[in-house]
Amino acid sequence: MAKVVVDVMLKPEILDPQGQAIQRALPSLGFSRVTSVRQGKHFELDVEGDDDPVAAAEEVARTLLANPVIEDFSVRVVEAAK
Amino acid sequence: MAKVVVDVMLKPEILDPQGQAIQRALPSLGFSRVTSVRQGKHFELDVEGDDDPVAAAEEVARTLLANPVIEDFSVRVVEAAK
Amino acid sequence: MAKVVVDVMLKPEILDPQGQAIQRALPSLGFSRVTSVRQGKHFELDVEGDDDPVAAAEEVARTLLANPVIEDFSVRVVEAAK
Amino acid sequence: MAKVVVDVMLKPEILDPQGQAIQRALPSLGFSRVTSVRQGKHFELDVEGDDDPVAAAEEVARTLLANPVIEDFSVRVVEAAK
């Protein structure tokens, strides 16, 4: 079994109001070093079987986790198959 | 500037209905290899300055990105300061 | 068919960092009249059939939309069955 | 003070994978009456002062809660000013 992470972010050209709200809240809390915040979704998948777990997760991401018109996603294995 | 990622997940003992919905939707789409899905939030921060960007992002995460009572978070640098 | 809305909010005693970030961002944008912000999830369901659509949506909410340990939900019909 | 609700939904023509995942999970749980699910964000704002609280919340929504390019929002008062 492999543990695979899928991160989904709005495409860079699409305004992210959630991230902006956080960024604008930071100065009043004394966090002046953070100059940009973008918010996305993070998924952790357990993938069984010997075949390429990244390919399997990419298919799931494309179908069910992200809207490819407005979002990009990245896939990475964090724990190899055993 | 360093690019720092903060991932926020519900603690493992807390039920995640969003992840469960995705997991339950998978078989009908032919994705039988994915045995568990958990959903969280993903943040990408640009952190300026020479001091430890991870420590800075951890403080932001604790204050503004996660509720430590119900959520865990992890912080990692994806692009080192230049 | 009835259109039913389910709103899911963290319980009042549970800190909502997303809402707090928005609230803290408001003064710098000149929105000084908003004294509290809480963020939740909003679902719009189409429910078929003659039986009570609210009862059906409540069951869905309890099972798949909310975690009753940390969240409350409310259900209301916005468009009656035809 | 008025309590104002802002609901933010992806525009109808934009695919909502979160809502779709829930919809696809429903049959396996025996919820065959729900034919469509869309997921959005729900905000509850406390607005002070005598001026129109809806107008104030609309301005906040446009600036900080929604991305008007991909999302629609609606605003309604749930508890009148006292």
Image (spheres, coloured by chain):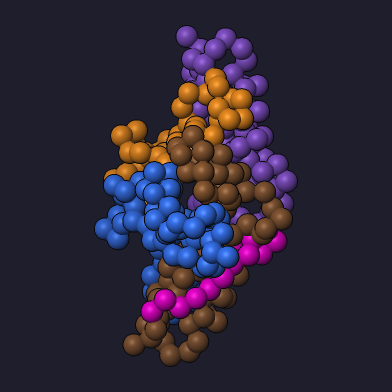
Chain colours: A purple, B orange, C blue, D brown
Q: Is residue B77 depicted above or below C4 in this figure? A: above
Q: Is residue A52 depicted above or below B28 in this figure? A: above
Q: Which residues are magenta?
A: D63-79
Residue plotted at (56% across, 59% down): C1
Residue D63 in sight here = no
Residue B26 in sight here = yes
Q: Is residue D43 left or right of residue A7?
A: left
Determine if the magenta segment contains residue C31: no
| Number of marks in the rendered image | 0
Q: Is residue B27 depicted above or below B7 in this figure? A: above
Residue B33 vs residue B10, the one in the foreground:
B33
Measuring from the top left, give residue B45's x and y in whole percent: 54, 46
Residue plotted at (43% across, 48% down): C60
Measuring from the top left, give residue C26's x and y in whole percent: 48, 70
Residue plotted at (54% across, 34% down): B25
Look at the image and tell me in which quarter the C terminus of chain B lies. Answer: top right
Residue plotted at (55% across, 82% down): D55
Look at the image and tell me in which quarter the N terminus of chain B lies. Answer: top right
**Farthest-out residue, front:** C50
Measuring from the top left, give residue A6's x and y in whole percent: 57, 32
Measuring from the top left, give residue C36's x and y in whole percent: 38, 70
**Farthest-out residue, left:** C13
Q: Is residue C8 left or right of residue D58?
A: left
Determine if the magenta segment contains residue D65: yes
